[in-house]
Amino acid sequence: MHSGSNRYLANLLRLCKDQKCKLSGKVIHGSILRTGFSIDTYLCNRLLDLYCECGDKGYARKVFYEMPVRDVYSSNAFLTFCCKVGNLGEATKVFDAMPERDVVSWNNMISVLVRKGLEEEALVVYERMVSQGFLPSRFTLASVLSACSKLLDGVTGMRCHGVAVKIGLDGNIFVGNALLSMYAKCGLMVEHGVRVFECFPEPNEVSFTAVINGLARENRVLEAVHMFRSMCEKGVKVDPVCLSNILRISAPREECESLNEINRNVLGKQIHSLMLRLGLQGDLHLSNSLLETYAKNGDMNGAELIFTEMPEVNIVSWNIMIAGFGQDYQSHKSIEYLKRMRESGFEPNEVTCTSVLGACFRSGDVETGRSIFSSMLNPSVTAWNALLSGYSKFEHYEEAINQFREMHLQHLNPDRTTLSVILSSCARLRFLEGGKQIHGVAIRNNISRNSHIVSGLIAVYSECEKIEISEHIFDDCTTELDIACWNSMMAGLSRNSLDTKALMLFRRLLRTGVLFPNETSYATLLGSCSRLCSLLHGRQFHGHVVKSGYASDPFVETALTDMYSKCGEIDSARELFDTVLVKSIVLWNEMIHGYAHNGRGDEAVGLYREMISWGEKPDRITFVSVLTACSHSGLVDTGLEILSSMQRDHGIEPELDHYICIVDCLGRAGRLEDAEALAEATPYKNSSVLWEILLSSCRVHGDVSLARRIAGKLVALDPRNSATYVLLSNIYTSVRRWDEAAALQGLMNKNRVYKTPGHSWIIENNNSL
């Protein structure tokens, strides 16, 4: 009778639990208490199940703690409930008080620790579990592998893999997917994850998604795309998460260049078509991923069409459009979308304002950018960084430094991006004191050894001719630096005419065997070879460039052309030039200048005309190069014709450098009166350099009369310039007018004008003498 009553009450409680009828359960609970059945552990466990299922924490706790006798089931039921509601403190208390535990107890504890972000503690509990002889279940391994993923602990993850193999759970899809996710997050997909995947008898969409994500993380983009195609061919269900991952591959990333722009666009559009065919266009997260793909690929027309057709948008959608137009240099569209966003009831967040700010500066609209920033109530450090970066990009370095001071006054703590931008501005301005102050801030914030900061500090001290400080900073942090810091140090040495030391530093870089030179490294070192006229080193670096795969980089191509030209190997420079498929204006200029430098004016002019015929628009540097070639090769009429075509045909107003070339050209040809007339007619007739060039020509042709006239103009422009007196004195000496030369020397002494002594140097055994 007693046993039958218990069974009957237990069945009623089970029914109340299944139907979540807590009120009826409480009535039965009262009956149990009145009849004295509350001492029955089995009935108490059913009551505990009821209250846990109904989420009544108070009654669940009351039943659990008032039970006369608790078994493993009681403890596990209440422990599971505590873990479910996230009460870590009580779960730990119950777990520690359990007289005996089973796998369920351990699983519950490990699971709640992982969910609470206490992954390291979860791994400690797992080690305790294994050490006490418990075999982990698939749930245990899934939770532990999740902890390893979050901690990026591939070593523990591989040990778990070994345990799974040992107990026969490696073929379980649940454990296998957790392994794939762990290997993907830890960057071990290629090394270990792919082998796990290949052992799966029937991988599902989670398996494929994990592998695709892992391959993409390791920049194996083409392999990730092939894996996605394999997934589609095998008929595995494609879900929005998988499509979002593959769309992320379609968007350009700086660290990954496996797919060219055309392939990315095609892949993005194929995924778009598949998304429509599967009817997934209503998924907001997936639609935003597609929107971002089009925006990052620069197809803002396509992005607008998608945005218009989206059934639902959120603030992320608006931000993608605003940032996309900013990347496309359409600041007016970014501002338009900001207005539309507000009209639609969405309040812009920090990402929105920062995107608009970046768009304005990227498009050169500095005033609007400043206005947008001023409208922000409490701009964050990220917003300040966007403002400072914008000023620095458009060479408003002083304004960037002034705004940084304002940021400091508002008690905002700068991050490494802030300090990097300001260090760059200080370097450009050669503002040593400012660089020292930023150095102090970096030390106080404990980021002075950060590679971005170190690179900026090296640049500041190098630009300010404090190269020994740059070297000290570099040597103090060598083991922690990235390639950008090595490049900054090599560039600093090169800027300070220490090109030999720059080459020696490159050898040090190779000896480390850890870092590898990139295109910036080679461009810098080839510049050093040019200045040293070291063809031997230049050819060696050319070999390195080809072997490293940087031969097609525009900066390297230009540096190689310059190196061969400066070393007198102009034909080698032309051979290299002809192999370049897409020639930049800088490369054209460099080749024209190379011909000029090597006295091959006809070929320089011919290349200039070829450039025009190819539809390339010349700039002011182009004209300096070709006019220099005309001057050095005596192509007077050609030079005059090119000078007159600058404004007429190309809309470029001639500047001082262009007039200097033509005055020099006329002077060398003996057309001194034409040169004088041209100099007088230019807007730069008050420039002493122009007249010094003509005065030098007077010496060559022995025109004393014109020389006196020009010297008078130069003395009037700059009475203390010794070059004028020296040039005129040399002219008098060359025609044996000793008295006038002596009188000129006396005038120099009277006016206290002194010639700056020159110096020469040679290199012996790598030492300057």
Image (cartoon, rainbow, N blue to C red):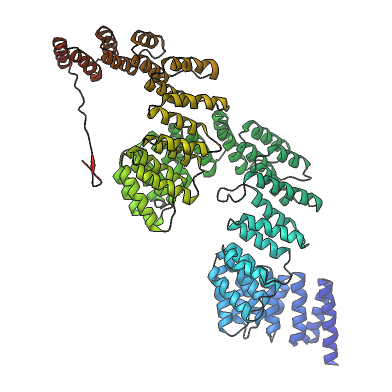
Q: Position of residue 767 (x, y in %)?
A: 23, 45
Residue 521 visible in the snapshot: no
Q: Who's the residue at 41% across and 44% down the image?
A: 456
**Closer to the camera, 664 or 454?**
664
The relative height of residue 303 versus residue 125 in the rendered view (above or below) is above
Q: Quadrant of residue 327?
A: top right
The relative height of residue 542 versus residue 7 in the rendered view (above or below) is above
Q: Who's the residue at 47% across and 40% down the image?
A: 557
Q: Position of residue 23 (x, y in %)?
A: 82, 71
Q: Quadrant of the C terminus?
A: top left
**Closer to the camera, 293 or 767?**
767
- Lateral position of residue 25 relative to residue 155, left or right: right
Q: Who's the residue at 46% across and 42% down the image?
A: 556
Q: Position of residue 370 (x, y in %)?
A: 54, 32
The relative height of residue 177 versus residue 724 in the rendered view (above or below) is below
**Closer to the camera, 734 or 231?**
734
Q: Who's the residue at 81% across and 72% down the image?
A: 22
